[in-house]
Image: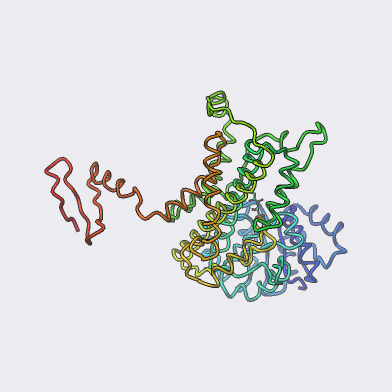
Amino acid sequence: ATAQIGVTGLAVMGSNLARNFARHGHTVAVHNRTAAKTKTLVEQHGHEGTFVPAETAEEFVAALQKPRRIIIMVKAGEATDAVIDEFAPLLDEGDVIIDGGNAHFADTRRREKDLRDKGIHFVGAGISGGEEGALNGPSIMPGGSAESYKSLGPLLESIAAKAADGTPCAVHVGPDGAGHFVKMVHNGIEYADMQLIAEAYDLLRTVGGFAPERIAEIFRTWNTGRLDSYLIEITAEVLAHKDAATGRPFVDIVADEAEQKGTGRWTVQTALDLGVPVSGIAEAVFARSVSGHKELREAANGLPGPSAEAAALSPAAAEEFAARVEEALYASKVVSYAQGWNMIAKASDEYGWNIDLGAMAAIWRGGCIIRAAFLDRIRAAFAADPQLPTLLADRQFAEEVGRAQDAWREVVATAVRRGVPTPGFAAALAYYDALRAERLPAALTQGQRDFFGAHTYRRTDREGSFHTPWSGDRTEEQTA
Ligand code: 6PG
């Protein structure tokens, strides 16, 4: 046996990952359900390194050095279970199966437990960066046992993206489902980032009166500052692109119904179960959902908008407005990352994962879809205070958001006045205001609950639980 690693499932992600390993000098066993794909890969890319093509599962396993390391790159769900069932009986104690798909972390926990009982390590690894990342350096989030990372870690780190300071964008996240959990939250944050960028574009176009090409330039400028990120960079590319058939801006000929494969939705579902408010991510998922409901949109088409006619902004006013939108986008982004990190922290406690919060920011600095200069700031915030309760309390972020808030409020107010939907900006601002408020109207909610259901309340001035008999004489009773 000569191969250090094996990849089964040779669709684009799988073959690119296999090529990445080969290009880094590792001997890679490759296998696919239909052998033709294996053949094509070796024919087209065999010169890039050393591949060992295997037609059968047995040949594939025999090609691997021990402990065997097999990466499964198939569609998340039943296909993953089918491949595990095929390979597990052929493996020995101490071998490692890695699932590199976008699996739900609960499935990963189940699979890890089943295989652990058989002495096999199961590593649910989040891999981000799309096809290009898989080939040239993704961000990798492996879960599973610390022991499995000993033999697997160096291989993954060798093919991972490197952050600007040279650190590989791969780290052992934590036991069982921890890796797939953080990948899920990564995707939730990705949804939130994309929604905020979409809202910024919409405002620049509708209120600012800028054409897509000019907005592309604005995004390019933003990309040289604190918003510097992959998503801002590609936004500029998409906005500058012209449709070849019509000569119109590409963004104007694409159907405005956003699709989703489910990881954003999972993030929100899981956040609800964990009791962590991730309103930024939730609004992003709902915004995609709203866009896709053609029948609702058609039924509502023609409903009145703001009655006051808005005058076009002067060029100078439009530039000022664009600067305010940048502030609103940045502040809202800080909020959605704060929420995402709260979710990781809560799950880490709940499942005993002991996740290093700063390390997650560190491995997202390169390779992944949300890669950004900004993530180094988050890493630094957790380095300064590993127990930081919210990113908003980090001194630097607090200062920046504090400085941005007037512009942020102005932008949300303008959006409301002009009838431009900005659920991301508005939800982020509401969250910020809720966290900083000295008193919340939740006290009234508690009163209502006690009124109709005797659900009790706590007081600000004394310990215990209390109930007021609302339909009786309203003499307060202490219930606990
Ligand atoms: C990544 C991406 C990847 C996936 C997107 C698309 O990290 O490389 O997140 O996993 O392409 O999540 O998801 P939607 O189809 O749901 O937008």
Pick whichever, 66 or 157, lies toward us.
Answer: 157
Is residue 340 visible in the rendered structure shown here? yes
User: Left or right: where does residue 220 sit relative to residue 105?
Assistant: right
Q: Position of residue 226 (x, y in %)?
A: 65, 58
Q: Quadrant of residue 104?
A: bottom right
User: Left or right: where does residue 116 sit relative to residue 362?
Assistant: left
Compared to residue 242, the image places residue 9 above or below, namely: below
Q: Position of residue 83 (x, y in %)?
A: 64, 57
Q: Position of residue 321 (x, y in %)?
A: 62, 44
Q: How is the image coloured?
A: rainbow
Circle count: 0
User: Left or right: where does residue 46 sit relative to residue 211?
Assistant: right
Pick whichever, 214 or 341, lies toward us.
Answer: 214
Quadrant where the image shows the C terminus: bottom left
Which residue is located at x 64 percent, y 45 percent?
A: 320
Which residue is located at x 43 percent, y 55 percent?
A: 435
Quadrant where the image shows the N terminus: bottom right
Q: Quadrant of residue 251?
A: top right
Q: Position of residue 257 (x, y in %)?
A: 63, 36
Compared to residue 302, the image places residue 204 above or below, namely: below
Is residue 122 visible in the rendered structure shown here? no
Pick whichever, 20 or 42, lies toward us.
Answer: 20
Which residue is located at x 60 percent, y 45 percent?
A: 195
Compared to residue 67, the image places residue 223 above or below, namely: above
